[in-house]
Image: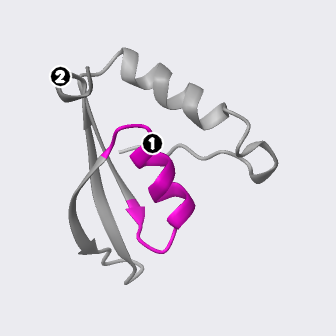
């Protein structure tokens, strides 16, 4: 698993959308984990057609997170 992060000063400028679009071009399915308290990120991924699959607790941090998924077939 890898992580993609956008520096705060570049958020809301289209950088995240371009990164996700680039990754979607070479994959049929993507999955990610995002903290439920990170409302901005959760809403961003929803706008990018990711769906919440489940809610879980990350063992290392004890933080509640969503498992989210995007599928090329369902987004066309």
Image location (x, y in percent) of residue 51: 27, 48
Left or right: 57 as drawn, with respect to 3: left
Residue 41 lies, with reference to residue 60, above or below; the image says: above
**Camera-side residue of 62 and 14:** 14
Residue 34 is tagged as none
Image location (x, y in percent) of residue 59: 30, 78
**Residue at which label 2 appears:** 73
Left or right: 21 as drawn, with respect to 51: right
Residue 28 lies, with reference to residue 51, above or below; the image says: above
What residue is drawn where x is 70% and y is 44%? 12
- Image quadrant of residue 49? top left
Image location (x, y in percent) of residue 69: 26, 44
Q: How far apart are marks 1 and 2 (CA)?
A: 17 Å
In this picture the colour scheme is one colour
Report the magenta residues as a range: 34-50
Residue 47 is tagged as 1
Quarter of the image with the N terminus is top left
Image location (x, y in percent) of residue 24: 38, 23
Residue 1 lies, with reference to residue 52, above or below; the image says: above
- Image quadrant of residue 14? top right
Quarter of the image with the C terminus is top left
């Amino acid at each position: 698993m890898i992580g993609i992060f956008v520096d705060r000063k570049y958020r809301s400028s289209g950088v995240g959308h371009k990164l996700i679009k680039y990754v979607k071009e070479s994959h049929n399915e993507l999955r990610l984990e995002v903290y439920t308290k990170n409302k901005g990120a959760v809403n961003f991924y929803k706008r990018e057609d990711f769906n919440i699959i489940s809610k879980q607790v990350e063992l290392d941090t004890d933080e509640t997170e969503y498992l989210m998924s995007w599928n090329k077939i369902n987004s066309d």
